[in-house]
Image (cartoon, rainbow, N blue to C red):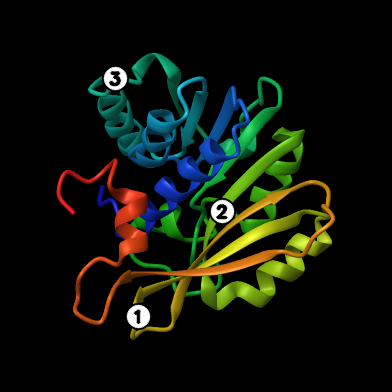
Amino acid sequence: MKVTTDACLFGAWVANDDNSEKIVVKRVLDIGAGTGVLSLMYAQKNLSSHIDAIDIDEDACQQAKENVVASPFGERINVIHGDVNKFALPGRYDCIISNPPFYEKEVSSDNEKKNLAHHHSGLLFEELLNIIKAGLSPSGTFYLLLPFKRNEEIKKILLKQHLWVSKIVFVKQSTKHNYFRMMMVGKFEKENYETVIEEISIWDDQQQYTKEFKDLLKDYYLRL
C-alpha cells in the first residue's frame, strides 16, 4: 500500500504534539491503521506508549505486522485485523488517532479495497466519532486527518457530537496551492481559550520541502 506524504506529515505532527505536551500517554488507538505508519511514528517519539492499530483490510494488516516486526517498537504495537465498529474496546485510551475515509459522498471506484480505504463503505465519519467518544478517556485527546473541502460540514458534526477541537492545522501541497487537508486535535471538554488555527505547506515555491515540513519529518525521513 502507498504511504502518502500528507499521512507522514500527520503522523509526525501527532507524535510531536503529544510528546511536546510532556504528558505520559500509555494507551493509544490507531483507527484505520493501514500499513502502520502512524503507529510506528507515534511509537518512535512516545516511548511509554502501547498502541492498538486496527484495520479492516487483511492485506494492509499483514503489511503493518511485517513493518512492526521489522521495527524497534514491535513489543509496543498490537496490529488487529477487524472492523472497528465491531471491535470490543479493552478499556479507554489516552489518545486516539485516525486518517479516516475521505470520500463519503463521492463516486466509488471499481476497486473494493480502495473503496474500503477511502469511502463510506468502510467507516462513516459520524461512526468514527462515536467510537472516539466510547473509547477516549475523559482527559484524552483525539487526532484526525481530514479533507479541507469538508471543513464546514465536519465542524457541524463535531459540535453535534459535543467534541471540542483545540487546534487545526490547514495543509497546503505547496505555498502556491489552496488548502487540501486539515489536521486537528480535540478533546471532550472545551478549555478556556479559542481553537488555535495554523497552516503548513509541504513544498515551497521552489518545489523544495518547507522548513516547517523538514522540522517535523527530519527524525523520520532519511534524506531531507
Q: Are marks 1 and 3 in contact (CB under 8 Å)?
A: no
Few, some or many residues within 10 Å of mark 2 (<14, 14–19, 20+): some
In this view of the protein, can residue 189 be seen by the observer?
yes
Residue under the image location 31 percent in, 25 percent down = 68
- Say if 14 sits above or below 50 in the image: below
Residue that mark 1 sits on: 175
- Say if 85 sits above or below 50 in the image: below
Q: Earlier in the sequence, mark 3 or mark 2?
A: 3
- Say if 206 sits above or below 123 in the image: below
The Cα–Cα distance between marks 1 and 2, rounded to whole angstroms, is 22 Å
Few, some or many residues within 10 Å of mark 1 (<14, 14–19, 20+): some
For badge 1, the amino acid type reads: Thr
Where residue 27 sits in the image (x, y, percent)?
59, 24
The part of the image, by quadrant, that contains residue 96 is top right
Residue that mark 2 sits on: 144
Is 220 placed left or right of 131 in the picture? left
Secondary structure type for disc 2? strand
Q: Earlier in the sequence, mark 1 or mark 3?
A: 3
Residue under the image location 66 percent in, 25 percent down = 88
92 vs 107, nearest the viewer: 92
Residue that mark 3 sits on: 72
Where residue 35 sits in the image (x, y, percent)?
33, 39
The part of the image, by quadrant, that contains residue 64 is top left
